[in-house]
């Protein structure tokens, strides 16, 4: 009570301090770097990550791109190569003219090298950068290459993907927030009892979102997924807390003539209910931190922080705003559009066996679809982008003109004799799907001594520690075929050089597949156990956590099972995050209803009346909360051209509705069925 009275007394000071805090927060948002490279979140101790670091630190080569030039004469291409070489952070350019140096007789160069770099209308060149794949300077260099080369050139590679992704994200993100605010506002205008209320809510939540995004500065950087989703998610999952306070305040106004006193009591009541409610949501996000693929930790920390700030804002900033605007808020109130649910509740409780049958029937198909969806995900980040974006067009050209779908790089010990490397190259080129291997030995052939090779060419592919080989493959990144190919290549490589490393986008993606497959199981288990314990403590029951989690897990199975039946493939990160987020964010609906049911049963009411009363009391809050989460995410899902953002938002929107329906229709039936079990396994449930 002391805390709430302090908030009420110092409401103007709280608002002034909040506005002042927004200044460093905005600066923090501007100063927080955004990472667009998913491969950066792989564990640092795996071979591909170590290899990428070796390539950059010891070889001076980080990012790598293949560039296709169409309908350009060799002389013009040679001039273009010179221009590209002068761009800052371009380490070297490898093209046929680079290899066909005047000091090497043309007839001595293997004919296939020319064919691999040229078709009847296209020329290909490889560009190495001295900076990391997703470094800002690399993206600047990619943009400059595109500016110099014009419409005749197409740039592929991870750095091109990251550049296009960044540009698209930066264009779309303000619209995400605008759509989330607009749709959430419409939902609240329809479902709440005041015309001005949504705008006060959104002001309070918006302030907390700015503070949350500002404190990300101390993390150094966040992923583009976290940046794109955090504001929308924070708005969606913390909207409930504002609704709790508003309803509680209006109830207390009828009991107390002094609105300050009414708000003081409302803050106390809200704080008690919101803390319990927020624990499950925070637990869901914290579970993501257990992923070895550290994108989960990135999103988990930011969102857990956002929920915590949402609670703080709900009991400090929002009460202050409501008290300041109390008169206009009261004048613009209207009757809630949600009707009385007494008749509906009786229908549910009278026919509860029907809903138990529905529950049993839904389990097998939803569980089957869920298991299939988890195996039908895609890992190729290029699939997230629209087909008309530059990176996707370049990849299509590379595949159509040169039959190259992915490029691997091999770092092999420079001390290994040329004869052994030639043997290794011969073995590698016999592996299914390998188009050719480009290295000093393949360029020179067996007839040309390495000593006559110009120093500038030698430096591109070799230094004192490592020799670099480029392997072009016909198989697409993240496909089963390329993953099997990578296993065979690693076997050959380790036979010749146990310290050698196979790196590149496809090997990294293979590691990502193996890493996230483990993560999915770990995160699911951690979130279920954490939320089980929270429900057990909140409800003081052994049986209720099983019942509540069963209802929400069914909703998750339905939500994540539908893509299989609809023929949709999801980005790999979506099922991992959504299963945890949906459980943490929507189990509150079940807790709300169950808590009221317990109160009614403990008061001596029979099970049917207790469940019906709990339904009547809970449905308005569940509908407002569920539709709020739906509204905040659905608009973004429909608008975004980035499939990973669109898919996750659609899953959250649909998950909110499915969880809402499962709690309203199936939970009451389970409470009716398990009444005796709940009674005997729940502390304090005794007849009065």
Image (tube, helix red, strand yellow):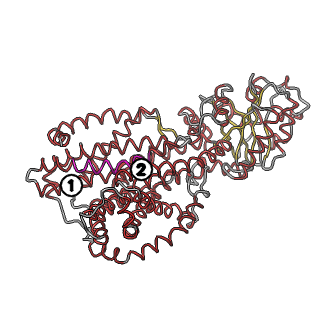
Horizontal and vertical percent position of residue 203 = 27, 47
Towards the viewer: 164 or 401: 164
Stretch in magenta: 268-285
Towards the viewer: 446 or 427: 427
- Pick whichever of labels 1 and 2 is earlier in the sequence: 1
| Residue 34 is covered by the magenta coloring | no
Would residue 15 appear left or right of 372 to someone viewing this image? left
Considering the image in quadrants, where does the C terminus appear?
bottom left
Considering the image in quadrants, where does the N terminus appear?
top left
Horizontal and vertical percent position of residue 681 = 38, 59
In this view, the residue farthest toward the left is: 257
Task: Identify which residue is drawn at 33% across, 39% down.
Answer: 211
Seen in the picture, residue 619 relative to 453 is either above or below; the reply is below
How far apart marks 1 and 2 lie (CA) works out to 28 Å
Towards the viewer: 401 or 600: 600
Q: Quadrant of residue 624?
A: bottom left
Horizontal and vertical percent position of residue 157 = 64, 42
Q: Residues within 10 Å of mark 1 (few under 14, many from 20)?
A: some
User: Closer to the camera: disc 1 or disc 2?
Assistant: 2
Residue 268 in sight here = yes
Task: Identify which residue is drawn at 67% across, 25% down.
Answer: 58
Horizontal and vertical percent position of residue 74 = 75, 39
Q: Quadrant of residue 451?
A: top right
Would residue 616 appear left or right of 76 to someone viewing this image? left
Task: Identify which residue is drawn at 21% across, 36% down.
Answer: 16
Residue 643 in sight here = no
Q: Which residue is mark 2?
A: 533
Q: Quadrant of residue 42?
A: top right
- Secondary element under disc 1, as helix, strand or loop, is helix
Query: Residue 248 got which mark?
Result: 1
């Amino acid at each position: 009570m002391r805390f709430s009275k302090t908030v009420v007394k110092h409401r103007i000071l709280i608002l002034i301090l909040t506005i002042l805090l927004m200044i460093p927060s905005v600066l923090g948002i501007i100063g927080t770097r955004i990472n667009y490279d998913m491969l950066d979140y792989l564990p640092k101790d795996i071979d591909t990550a170590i290899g990428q670091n070796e390539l950059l630190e010891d070889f001076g080569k980080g990012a790598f791109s293949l560039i296709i030039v169409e309908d350009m004469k060799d002389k013009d291409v040679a001039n273009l190569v010179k221009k590209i070489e002068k761009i800052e952070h371009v380490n070297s350019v490898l093209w046929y003219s680079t290899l066909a140096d005047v000091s090497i007789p043309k007839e001595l160069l293997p004919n296939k090298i020319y064919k691999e770099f040229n078709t009847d209308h296209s020329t290909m060149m490889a560009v190495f950068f001295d900076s990391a794949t997703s470094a800002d300077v690399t993206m600047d260099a990619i943009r400059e290459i595109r500016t110099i080369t014009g419409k005749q050139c197409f740039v592929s590679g991870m750095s091109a993907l990251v550049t296009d992704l960044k540009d698209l994200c930066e264009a779309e993100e303000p619209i995400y927030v605008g759509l989330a605010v607009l749709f959430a506002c419409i939902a609240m205008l329809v479902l709440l009892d005041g015309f001005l209320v949504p705008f006060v809510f959104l002001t309070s939540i918006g302030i907390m979102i700015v503070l949350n995004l500002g404190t990300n500065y101390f993390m150094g950087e966040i992923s583009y997924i976290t940046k794109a989703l955090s504001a929308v998610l924070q708005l969606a999952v913390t909207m409930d807390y504002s609704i709790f306070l508003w309803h509680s305040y209006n109830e207390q106004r009828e009991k107390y003539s002094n609105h300050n006193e009414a708000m003081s009591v409302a803050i106390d009541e809200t704080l008690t209910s919101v803390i319990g409610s927020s624990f499950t949501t925070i637990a869901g996000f914290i579970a993501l931190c257990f992923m070895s693929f550290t994108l989960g930790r990135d999103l988990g920390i930011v969102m857990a922080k956002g929920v915590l700030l949402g609670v703080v804002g709900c009991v400090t900033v929002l009460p202050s705003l409501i008290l300041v605007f109390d008169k206009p808020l009261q004048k613009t109130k209207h009757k809630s559009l949600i009707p009385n649910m007494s008749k509906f509740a009786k229908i549910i409780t009278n026919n509860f066996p029907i809903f138990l049958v529905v529950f049993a029937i839904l389990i097998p198909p939803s569980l089957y679809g869920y298991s299939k969806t988890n195996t039908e995900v895609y890992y190729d980040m290029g699939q997230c982008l629209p087909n008309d974006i530059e990176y996707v067009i370049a990849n299509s050209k590379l595949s159509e003109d040169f039959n190259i779908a992915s490029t691997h790089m091999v770092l092999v010990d420079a001390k290994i004799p040329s004869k052994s490397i030639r043997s290794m190259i011969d073995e590698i080129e016999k592996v299914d799907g390998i188009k050719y291997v480009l290295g000093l030995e393949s360029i020179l052939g067996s007839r040309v001594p390495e000593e006559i090779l110009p120093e500038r060419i030698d430096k591109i592919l070799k230094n004192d520690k490592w020799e670099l080989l480029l392997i072009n493959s016909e198989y697409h990144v993240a496909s089963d075929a390329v993953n099997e190919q990578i296993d065979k290549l690693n076997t050959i490589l380790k036979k010749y050089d146990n310290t050698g490393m196979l790196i590149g986008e496809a090997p990294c993606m293979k590691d990502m597949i193996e890493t996230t497959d483990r993560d999915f199981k770990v995160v699911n288990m951690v979130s279920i156990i954490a939320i089980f314990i929270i429900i057990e403590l909140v409800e003081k029951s052994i049986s209720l956590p099983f019942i509540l989690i069963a209802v929400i897990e069914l909703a998750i199975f339905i939500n994540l099972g539908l893509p299989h039946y609809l023929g949709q493939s999801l980005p790999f990160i979506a099922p991992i995050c959504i299963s945890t987020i949906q459980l943490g964010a929507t189990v509150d609906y079940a807790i709300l209803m169950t808590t009221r049911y317990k109160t009614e049963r403990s008061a001596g009411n029979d099970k049917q009346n207790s469940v019906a009363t709990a339904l009547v009391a809970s449905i308005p809050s569940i509908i407002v909360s569920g539709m709020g989460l739906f509204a905040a995410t659905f608009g973004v899902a429909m608008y975004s051209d980035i499939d990973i953002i669109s898919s996750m938002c659609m899953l959250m929107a649909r998950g909110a509705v499915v969880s809402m329906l499962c709690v309203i229709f199936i939970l009451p039936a389970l409470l009716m069925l398990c009444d005796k079990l709940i009674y005997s396994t729940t502390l304090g449930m005794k007849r009065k």
